[in-house]
Image (cartoon, rainbow, N blue to C red):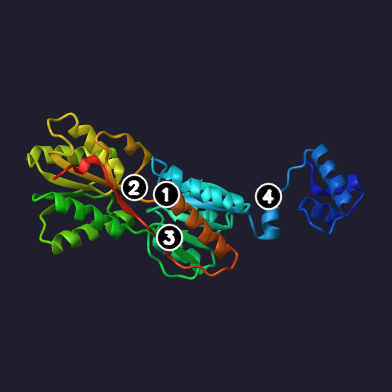
Amino acid sequence: MVGIREIAKRANVSISTASYAMNGSSKVKPETRNRILAIAAELNYIPNMAGRILKKQKTNLVGVYLTNYGGAFYGELVSGIHEFLHQHHYDVIICSGERAHVFIPEKMIDGAIILDSTFSTETIVEYANRGHQMVVLDRELTQKNICSVRLNNQQGALEAVTQLNKAHSHKIYLVSGPSETYDSNARLHAAIRYLTENNSPYEIIAGDFSKKSGRAAARYILAKQEKMCGVFCLNDEMAIGMYSVFQKSTWQIGKDISIIGFDNIEVSHYLKPRLATIDYSKTEWGEKAAQKLFSMMNGEPTTDELIDVHLKGGESIGDF
């Protein structure tokens, strides 16, 4: 493999001059830099990335940590992150799994955006204490190297159960997400608090944010034969799973049962009747997270932020 020494020799310049030219330094005259770059291209020179990182202490890479890539949720979020960072000359790598955590302490990335319930809070705080900068989307943390950009889950849950409570004199079912997930817990606790304060009967059905758990919840409700009830699914994936069961039964969504989801994912737009759901801009969420991280990496002050949410109506809540 051709090295910088060979390029310097061919160009009849010092190794340091060749290095400056390859890194776009203004210390080298344009005509000399162009001549060196032409020789590098002729020799198929590939820069030593590891060496550059050691010298510059910068990779221009940001890691985005996700619990998984499944479902229809992540595309818009990652698009918002990528669009902002690309404009500021950063590339994005998508990470999942514990082995990818070492990218942070080994400085293979300049910063991280984390929406990964399997990434422990203790590890995040430990890395922050070492000086690594991160934006978290799924937890509340107070540390100078950590910024939080979260959904206003409490407001979304309040709007959902308020609407269901207005529509129903019967029970409201809450289909939860994974117990270790911040968003699920925040939505669930806010819904329970409102229903308890208003003496409204409710029941929790354990879910895991998957269509499969939504189908299981629907079968459970059907077996109880309690029509004129409401369901708040803590994400749209579970609501879609419920649709697939109820639409094969004699129950009519929006008439015998009302359903509200959370996330307004694109596929939910095609459900009949249209699913009522808690809406927000996933692109904005990703962009805000990227902005915060960029500011932190450039030594600028940042503050935590909540992303606004609102109820988007649909025929799934009917005219009760």
Front-lying residue, 139 or 159: 159
- Tag shown at residue 169: none
**Could you say which is closer to the camera, residue 216 or residue 250?**
250
Q: Image quadrant for the N terminus?
A: top right
Residue type, label 4: Met
Which numbered disc flags the more N-terminal residue, 1 or 4?
Answer: 4
Q: Is residue 223 above or below residue 203?
A: above
- State the separation of the CA atoms marked 2 and 1: 8 Å
- Evaluate if marks 2 and 1 touch, with contact meaning CB atoms under 8 Å apart: yes
Q: Is tag 2's residue or tag 3's residue first in the polypeptide sequence?
A: 3
Relative horizontal placement of residue 71, taking residue 85 as reference (left or right): left
Residue sitting at 21 percent across and 57 percent down? 191
Q: Please, what secondary structure does the residue beneath circle 1 have?
A: helix
Residue, disc 1: 282
* Kind of element beneath mark 2: loop
Q: CA distance from mark 3 to mark 4?
A: 32 Å
Residue of label 3: 149
Q: Give the CA distance from mark 4 to mark 2.
A: 39 Å
N-terminal-most mark, 3 or 4: 4
- The C terminus is located in which quarter? top left
Q: Which residue is mark 2?
A: 263
**Which circle's residue, 4 or 2, is located before the other in the chain?**
4
Judged by depth in the image, the label closer to the viewer, 3 or 1, is 1
**Residue 46: quadrant of the picture:** top right
Badge 3 amino acid = Val
Give percent across and percent down for residue 156.
29, 55
